[in-house]
Amino acid sequence: MTTISPTRVSMYDFLYHDTKPMVSLLADAAQLSLPQSRLAIDASLQVIVSALLAYQQRHHGQAVNKKLFCRSAIKELRKYNSMNFATIDATLYHRNDAADAIFNDNAKIIKASEHIAARTHTTVQQVQVLLTSLCAIALRELAILADYSQMDNEEIDKWFSLQPQFLSADRFSATNVQSSPENLVDDDISTDNTIELQPEYPAERYLLSAEQLSETPPPFDPYWYKLTNFKSERIEPVEDMQFATGNYLKAIGRSPDNLQQGQHNDMLVFAELQAIAVPHQRWLLQ
């Protein structure tokens, strides 16, 4: 992995792809439908990333490494090598600890939950369970990424400082119209004025008909910067972000596509099986 700089990896993209296999488990934990969970997860990842950037801006890389990535709750979660009902229970147990560490203000957690709940037709309590659970999962996954990349405190600072470029409006401008449920045009949906669709129906229809494995996550909502008090600065974009993020997903997931040669011959590799997916490959660590 020496040819790929960890600072070129988008946290938002990484977590978006990394948590896809967990949607059903998180939906069960928060008692949400799958479409509601997908919408709530997308928004939750955005506010979590924003809160992490605000944390680093205040406390810097050493605190991120020692107080977030190396806290006891995250170390315990890293002992598990699969994501199932047992490990989701451990995540639920540590979720409040992780959320408090990231946000350091319960009022912000509640306000974020209210904001997401209003847009997903769910309750604040349901969103809060999902949001705080994702805090624990996000810290675990980013801690693994930082550890695998052998980042020191200075590199962590650089990694965090480059993240706003991956969240800029310019990056998502080309997909804003296509990705909005309100702008969905589908010949299968009747336009007869006598049929009244429920408010949540277009969103569910969009989620169920869209490709769930899209390479690009939903546009980032700058509202989260305001909520978390993060001050974004303009940074020149990195062109190979998607390449770098994808390769780190392969490497940490022990994909045979990125098998290294030489001294790194002890990697646990899962061979590709036709028509069969390994949904939790990222969690099947050595």
Image (spheres, rainbow, N blue to C red):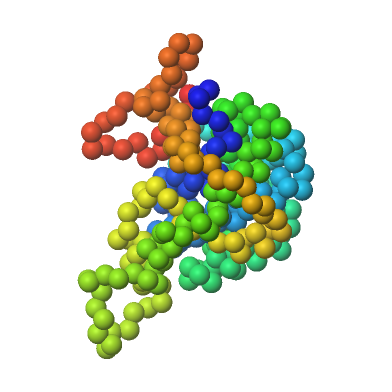
Question: Residue 209's spot in the image, x, y percent?
Answer: 30, 61
Q: Tell me, yes or no, if residue 154 can be seen here.
A: yes
Q: Nearer the viewer, residue 6 or 117?
A: 6
Residue at position x 67%, y 52% from top? 233
Left or right: residue 120 compared with residue 236: left
Residue at position x 22%, y 71% from top? 188
Q: Nearer the viewer, residue 141 or 259?
A: 259
Residue at position x 43%, y 19% from top? 260
Left or right: residue 183 compared with residue 113: left
Question: Residue 158's spot in the image, x, y percent?
Answer: 66, 38
Q: Is residue 169 above or below residue 1?
A: below
Q: Nearer the viewer, residue 124 or 11?
A: 11
Q: Is residue 119 above or below residue 209?
A: below
Location of residue 192 (image quadrant): bottom left
Question: Residue 201's spot in the image, x, y percent?
Answer: 36, 72
Residue at position x 44%, y 33% from top? 247
Q: Is residue 118 above or below residue 65?
A: below
